[in-house]
Image (cartoon, rainbow, N blue to C red):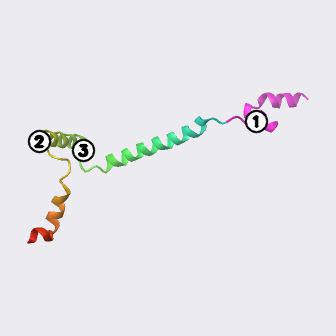
Amino acid sequence: MNSYLKALKNMDKDELLNLVGLETKHTIADAVVPTLTAFSVGVLVGVGIGLLLAPKPGSELRDDIKNRLARGEPAQPPAETFSRDAAPSPSRAL
């Protein structure tokens, strides 16, 4: 009998509940926390890859953005610039 009591004292809550056929109640946090953790790890990995593959160092990129904003230039050239340079449009050729 003493050995059974010692075994019961060494069990944790989940083992005792399992012994009588029950389990602990799961909350919303049990599902949300792993999801947020995986999302956060994904964001950090994405940022790290982005920094490794960046064409310029961060200080140069920030300076370029500041200069363009100061001059009032758009960050990207308009789409028509690409199409005009690539091939003349039929309406402009006439």
Say if mark 2 contacts mark 3, CB within 8 Å: no
Q: Classify 10 Å Cα crowding around label 2: few (below 14), some (14-19), many (20 and above).
A: few
In the shown orientation, is residue 53 left or right of residue 83? right
Can you tell which quarter of the image residue 25 is in?
A: top right
Q: Which residues are magenta?
A: 1-25
Q: Amino acid at mark 2?
A: Arg
> In front here: 84 or 4?
84
- Please count the marks in the image: 3
Q: Residue 22 sits in which quadrant?
A: top right
Q: Are marks 1 and 3 in contact (CB under 8 Å)?
A: no
Contact (Cβ within 8 Å) of mark 1 with mark 2: no
Residue 20: say if magenta.
yes
Q: Nearer the viewer, residue 49 or 26?
A: 26
Hey, what amino acid is under mark 1? Glu
Mark nearest the camera among 1 and 2 is 2
- Residue closest to the far left: 94
Q: Which residue is mark 1?
A: 15
Q: Which residue is mark 2?
A: 71
* Image height of 83 relative to 29, above or below: below
Disc 3 crowd rating (10 Å Cα; few below 14, some 14-19, many 20+) is few
- The secondary structure that dominates the magenta segment is helix
Compute the Cα span from label 2 to label 3. 22 Å
Q: Earlier in the sequence, mark 2 or mark 3?
A: 3
| Mark 1 or mark 2: whose residue is earlier in sequence | 1
Q: Earlier in the sequence, mark 1 or mark 3?
A: 1
Q: Which mark is residue 85?
A: none
Would you call the spot at circle 1 few (<14 residues within 10 Å), some (14-19), or many (20 or more)? some
Residue beneath label 3, please? 57
